[in-house]
Amino acid sequence: MTQGRPLLNRRLAEFGTTIFAEMSALAVRTGSINLGQGFPDTDGPEEVREAAVRALRAGHGNQYPPGSGVPELRSAITEHQHRRYGLAYDPDTEVLVTAGATEAVAAALLALLEPGDEVVALEPYYDSYAACIAMAGGTRVPVTLHPHDGAYRLDLDELRAAVTPRTRLILLNTPHNPTGTVLSRDELAAVAELACERDLLVVTDEVYEHLVFEGEHIPLASFPGMRERTVTVSSAGKTFSFTGWKIGWITASPELVTAVRSAKQFLTYVSGGPLQYAVAEALRLPDSYFDELRADLRAKRDLLSGGLTEAGFEVYRPAGTYFVTTDIRPLGERDGLAFCRALPERCGVVAVPNAVFYDHRDQGAPFVRFAFCKRTEVLTEAVGRLRSLAVR
């Protein structure tokens, strides 16, 4: 019946159940504190949740919304981009609302790649990137971020060397998950220069744009020559703590939006109609909301980073996102996957091994990621449990 072929498309054969599903299930099974998967343990602003309720009751978005997203949200997105970054976009032709940032990235890659095209991506990378490149028939070319002086750094010479005549696109993520790196103005200028010089497209995942603790977030599209070749991706989940709503978006030139929409319309077509109205209100929250969110997460970063240091990890304090990467070798460990599978039994905490985010698994083997987007009392309890590692 299967003609002797495996059931799973060979492009996806290397991808099994995601590490997040495995580790979250392990947390439930062992009753451990889940610092693996990056979702908050509290909801976002009450006024945003109430906006969704109002939309539901008023019948706004309960039927199919427009394919590009409801006008209210598209307008709010363009207002946000202009207010924050001075980027002007047309809400009717240069915005596309998606089912979260994951779909935005998938649709962009499916639309813009032909089989055999090379995609340069920063390694370690969010796990969906590799799968999406594979589904599009592309070839991923990793450029590894290396730890140095307490942080991860991009080697611009390595990036330039990774580009070949077959390169179609650079897939960028800043602030960067899982390392917490925030690319500097000089680094982004070098990426922009390379993209223009080699006539490359760029898809840039900026979902952590409001979670920057050191440095600043600068959209790549704001650099000379980049607006017409950049697909900028963001979403509401990380900024407003409603990760289950899955409302994301892209901003790009009309030509790029048209291309991405051609793929996206055959994935979900549309989603989250009433929630789109609520996210439109969320994007218009006062600056104080974003400032308080950042301050709260900075304090939680420092709490968890300090506890991990006391427990014996080498800690790479993140400049952005809500993840902290650690090196387990000071604990006498080298295999991050084995360490994470054993950690719940050892001290009742779940983390994620960074090796799964690498093509070069050996490069990521000793690194483990913890999420700090949890209540302070949960992080305090986790730090207390992790401290037991230091005395063994």
Image: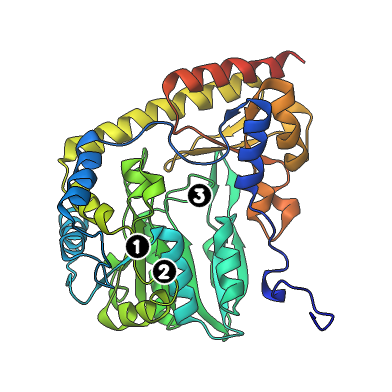
Q: Nearer the viewer, residue 267 or 308?
A: 267
The local crowd at label 2, few if under 14, some if 14 to 19, many if 20 or more residues have their Cα within 10 Å, is: few
What kind of residue is marked 2?
Thr
Residue at left 63%, top 54%?
357
- Tell me residue 212's x, y (percent): 36, 42
Kindly identify which residue carries mark 3. 177
Local crowd at mark 1 within 10 Å, few (<14), some, or many (≥20)? many
Tell me how far mark 3 sits from mark 1, CA to CA. 25 Å
Residue 377 % position (x, y): 45, 17
Name the quadrant containing residue 3.
bottom right
Q: Quadrant of the C terminus?
A: top right
The type of residue carrying mark 3 is Asn
**Spot occupied by residue 174 in the image (x, y as percentages of width and height):** 42, 54
The answer, for residue 201, to whether it is visible in the render is: yes
Name the one closer to the observer, 18 or 205.
18
The residue that disc 1 covers is 271
Q: Which residue is mark 2?
A: 268
SS for callout 3: loop
Q: Amino acid at mark 1?
A: Ser
